[in-house]
Image (cartoon, rainbow, N blue to C red):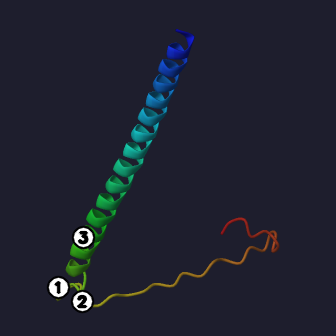
Amino acid sequence: MSKLYKILWLLVLLFIIATVLTFTFGLLLVGVIVAGLLGICRYCLLKKRSKQFTAWPKSNSSISTIEIIDIKRKASSDNPKDDSSC
């Protein structure tokens, strides 16, 4: 009988190992599939959005000119080495 129990325990152990390996492989496979699908969806969405921005936006006649204002920083006479205000 002890030989039969050893064989049964060996079969149970092999079944548990096979189950764990199958479950782990299944999780890895599902993770790869989900990551691939997310990558494909992201690529398609970025491609679709990039078509919207290929042409320059049409400007209104009132906003057609853009003015750039350059404001220079005041020189601090109190402490010239202190540049913490930037």
Which amino acid lies under the numbered mark 2 shown in the image of this protein? Answer: Ser
- Seen at 52% across and 14% down, the residue is 5
Label 3 neighbour load within 10 Å: few <14, some 14-19, many 20+: few
Q: Position of residue 17 (x, y in %)?
A: 49, 33
Q: Which residue is mark 2?
A: 64
Q: Nearer the viewer, residue 1 or 63?
A: 1
Q: Is residue 8 above or below residue 43?
A: above
Q: How many marks?
A: 3
Nearest to viewer (mark 2 / mark 3): 3
Q: Which mark sits nearer the N-terminus, 1 or 3?
A: 3
Q: Which mark is residue 60?
A: 1
Quarter of the image where one finds residue 50: bottom left
Placement of 86 over or under 2, stated as above or below: below
Q: For numbered disc 2, what is the local secondary structure? A: loop
Q: Look at the picture and state if 72 lies above or below 33.
A: below
Residue 70 at x, y percent in the picture: 51, 85
Give the distance between the C-alpha atoms of the residues marked 2 and 1, in whole angstroms: 6 Å
Of badges 1 and 3, nearer the viewer stands 3
How busy is the neighbourhood of tag 1: few (under 14 within 10 Å), some, or many (20 plus)? few
Mark 2 Cα shell of 10 Å, populated few (<14), some (14-19), many (≥20): few
Q: CA distance from mark 1 to mark 3?
A: 31 Å
Label pair 2/1, CB-CB below 8 angstroms: yes
Query: What residue is drawn where x is 78% and y is 74%?
Result: 77
Q: Which mark is residue 44?
A: 3
Q: Earlier in the sequence, mark 2 or mark 3?
A: 3
Local SS, label 3: helix
Q: Quadrant of the C terminus?
A: bottom right
